[in-house]
Image: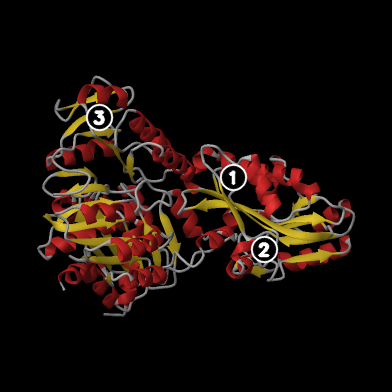
Amino acid sequence: MSILVNKNTRLLVQGITGHEGMFHTQQMVQYGTNVVAGVTPGKGGEWVLDGKVPVFDSVKVAVEVTGPNTSVIFVPARAAADAIFEAADAGIELIICITEGVPVADMMRVRRFLDQRSVRLIGPNCPGLLTPGEAKVGIIPGNIAIPGNVGVVSRSGTLTYEVLAALRLSGMGASTCVGIGGDPINGTSFVDVLELFEADPHTEKVVMIGEIGGSDEEAAAEFIATRMTKPVAAFIAGQSAPPGKRMGHAGAIIEGGSGGAEEKIAALESAGVRIARHPEEIPGLLNS
Amino acid sequence: MKLHEYQSKSIFARYGVPIPRGRVAGIAGEAKQIAEELGGRVIVKSQVLVGGRGKAGGIRLAKSPQEAEELATHILGMEIKGLKVRKVLIDEAVTIVKEIYLGITNDRAKRCPVMMASSEGGMEIEEVARKTPEKILKVAIDPLLGLRDFQARDLAVSMDLPKEHWKMFITIAHGLWRAYQENDATLVEINPLVITGDNRLLALDGKMIIDDNALYRHLDLTETRDLDEEAPAEIEARKYGLSFIKLDGEIGCMVNGAGLAMATMDIIKLFGGTPANFLDIGGGAGSEKVAAALRIILADKNVKAVLINIFGGITRGDEVARGILTAIREVKPKVPMIVRLVGTNAEEGRRLLANSNLITAETLVDAAQKAIAISKGG
């Protein structure tokens, strides 16, 4: 079992004919993900992957013809917000945006728009999702994880792979791995995913990978302390990061005392979360 | 990208925010001339991209053009927090009756811009925020609706601004919001916004930070980037789309992904080593980018070992390997390099690198420990 993506996922790939889109569509199909269609404006009517996947000019038409329930976005940063709007407008309920470098003002408008509808966005600037043995939506290398009962949620991309690989090395598998992305404004938070893992009968333990900046980890600590029954282990990246050169007071006023690695670790520890000093310690913390 | 005070204020002025008369000068003689034009009494303000200029003595009052020249000479020779002062802004001096704070930034938790105002503006604003947070007023701005008149008026009312200034305050708040939105800023700040002796509102200081991800929409601003304020390696890194921060340690790091790059630094520290830099080659980096990254790392004379940690997802191991080979051919590095390559196309990458003189590692801990041993002369 799993959360968000599984054998019933019918995937649309926006930006399918691009360099990254093509390569990772191939990888997703090889993994067994049901990719039903792709979209690249101007390439409608073509077929890719040896004639297996049809390409459409718009999400609207792709939805009418092939009925996807999930979309993954590989378009360049300047077109990413528009691609999200297009998918939401066409009625897709789960959108995963891999694209890195989306302007923050674009993301604030996207979030505001999506919050008024029942659409879930994961990312941007994220590696996507992997439900081992069932579906891979995004760029997480499929072979680094095996099916299991550990739910993984992470703000980082490659650091997530590190943890999945460490779990696998200890013979532990993942129910679903969710990369929520490292941007200041994203679609889905730690708390959103922790809530799903808490409700998923096949997830027994959870790994959370956070990093410095923002207060999403502190919010997660609050949620874990009050609402979670399943054990959680965490790693927070950036403990050695030097304080940035800062200008202006507004950031400090808004974020107050939160944002640093120490504060996050303290908040999580007081919520009963076990903290790893480095990613390879995580399997041990889950087993003890 | 941070903008200087003089740049920020001139942008604010375009949106109807009143600023003092003044101009920027690069040499002291010019400062004197500007002071003469402004009538003698001026403020000489160092233009560097850090806070705390006033406390460092980089902002001074001159009572005459002669004194403006002397102060400019002094300030233009200063270093503030490691940054050399290359320009001074000469602004007309005004009498200050009251100092207000007004700023906008993104509130990550609320996922929208927030306008903040306080009747206790000035240098101690962070202190005010810490000790008496109720004196900082905040309004969340709907990113689809923008700042509304009533919100700006509420701020004016709540901070007991005299009624005669409401109209101008609302104009300034709107101007600041438009400057924020239309330029893709992540911070705009007027501190202080003052009520002058002749009862005007005037933005005495200005700060602005532009979202780097949105610079493609603001090529006019990109041209104003002050390269003097940045380390050459950081400029070079940006040219190739690399995220690079120089540190003082001995182990050069090249990693894909910011989280993994930070974790790599954390582990180096945890096992007793010191990272020489933070370097994220980003997702999907090609061989050209990798070669540039390696050149930048190897240019640092403190580096005694290089740790390359690539866990491929969107980045492909074979591309990274080609980049490493290109860089080795070009730079002919003398320091040992430890490579850990896993994930997408990692096997092909490792095959490409098999014949070069690199130390390989399986896990992150293994890689870090090997790099530390070498950097300590092992």
Q: Tell me whether circle 3 and circle 2 mark residues in contact (CB < 8 Å).
A: no
Q: Quadrant of the C terminus of chain B?
A: bottom left
Question: Which label number is shown at residue B85?
Answer: 2
Residue B132 falls left or right of residue A144: right
Tell me, yes or no, if residue B209 can be seen here: no
Residue A108 falls left or right of residue B163: left
Query: Which residue occupies 21% across, 27% down?
Result: A67
Q: What element carries label 3?
A: strand
Q: Earlier in the sequence, mark 2 or mark 1?
A: 2
Separation (CA) of disc 1 from disc 3:
36 Å
Query: Which residue occupies 26% across, 26% down?
Result: A63
Residue found at the very far top of the displayed protein: A45
- Disc 2 chain ID: B
> Where is residue A15 shown, x and y percent of the image?
30, 33
Is residue B317 placed above or below A278 in the rendered structure? Answer: above
Residue type of the residue flagged with mark 3:
Gly
Image-quadrant location for residue A30 = top left
Question: Which label number is shown at residue B180?
Answer: 1
Separation (CA) of disc 3 from disc 2:
54 Å
Say if labels 1 and 3 share a chain: no
Say if labels 3 and 2 share a chain: no
Residue type of the residue flagged with mark 1:
Tyr
* Residue that mark 3 sits on: A38
